[in-house]
Amino acid sequence: MIGNKPRILVVDDEPETVKYVGTNLRARGYQVLTAADGTEALKVASEEVLDLIILDIMMPGPDGFEVCQAIRQESEVPIIILSARGQERDKVRALDIGADDYLTKPFGIEELLARVRAALRRSARSEVGPLPPIHTDDLTLDFSRRRVLVRGQEVSLTPTEYNLLAHLARNMGKVLTHRAILQSVWGPEYGDENDYLWAYVRRLRRKLEPDPQHPRYLLTEPGVGYRFEAPGHQESEVGTAPE
């Protein structure tokens, strides 16, 4: 971010969409860079410091899925997928490979701008305060340094993954509803995007759990939400978030 103006890369092979989105972002004070295809997007992302990427899926060359996956291997920059493909499997796939949000075309510009603001807030926010570390036989959460270790090896989490894990850990032992988690981690604009939550919990389980099919830490409360448990950790050492 240069000064107080976040830098946003808009990637779409439709010039009208690039112009429409770019004009509205600039009018709100954002710096805008553009790319017309996946190859150009990867080049810009490798050369520029970005705060957010708005990425179309259906493009010539590397498509949006491939671009998202490649960028996520190198960077934690927030990515909003913008696509005419609105099937649930496409949304889940995008979230599963590292996208932070998914908006289906046609879209309202105010909804897109709200999602941009929410993504930037999530990226900039450090949700966790002076919470003591959580240690189990396999898992360590070091909140002061924003580090997560599994069996002594540091695990790389995206900002959204970390914020979700931290929010659940702050409320260890409490059942949190889907809506409450979405609004706390993604923002007040959210509440019904349960597919987001499912995809992120699945990713966290793959990274943290000894057996993702039989989780120890990220537990499902069917039809309600999720709760975090840390077997072997002294619960008295950890505070919980205020109601």
Image (cartoon, helix red, strand yellow):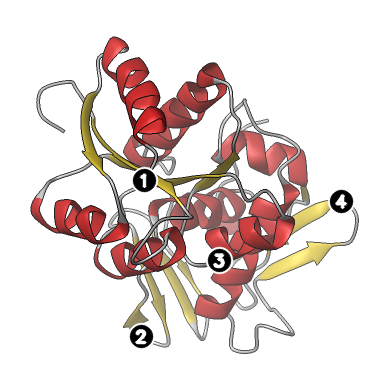
Front position in the image: 167 or 160: 160
Q: Is residue 217 left or right of residue 160?
A: right
From the viewer's perspective, is residue 98 above or below residue 5?
below
The numbered mark, 2 or 4, whose residue comes first in the sequence reads 2
Taking the view exactly as shown, the residue that stands out farthest to the right is: 223
Gap between marks 2 and 3 measured at Cα = 25 Å
The nearer-to-camera label among 2 and 4 is 4
Q: Which residue is mark 4?
A: 224
Gap between marks 1 and 2 measured at Cα = 44 Å
Q: Could one spot residue 153 in this view of the protein?
A: yes
Gap between marks 4 and 3 measured at Cα = 22 Å
Find numbered disc 4 in the image and state the secondary structure of the residue it sits on.
Answer: loop
Mark 4 vs 3: CB contact within 8 A: no
**Within the image, what quadrant is residue 179 found in?**
top right
**Within the image, what quadrant is residue 185 found in?**
top right
Find numbered disc 1 in the image and state the secondary structure of the residue it sits on.
Answer: loop
Quadrant holding the C terminus: top right
Q: Position of residue 157 (x, y in %)?
A: 40, 64
* Residue shown at the point (31%, 25%) measured from the top left: 22
Q: Could one spot residue 233 in this view of the protein?
A: no
Q: Specify the amino acid type for callout 4.
A: Val
Front position in the image: 161 or 99: 99
Q: Which mark is residue 13?
A: 1
The numbered mark, 1 or 2, whose residue comes first in the sequence reads 1
Gap between marks 1 and 4 measured at Cα = 40 Å
Find numbered disc 2 in the image and state the secondary structure of the residue it sits on.
Answer: loop
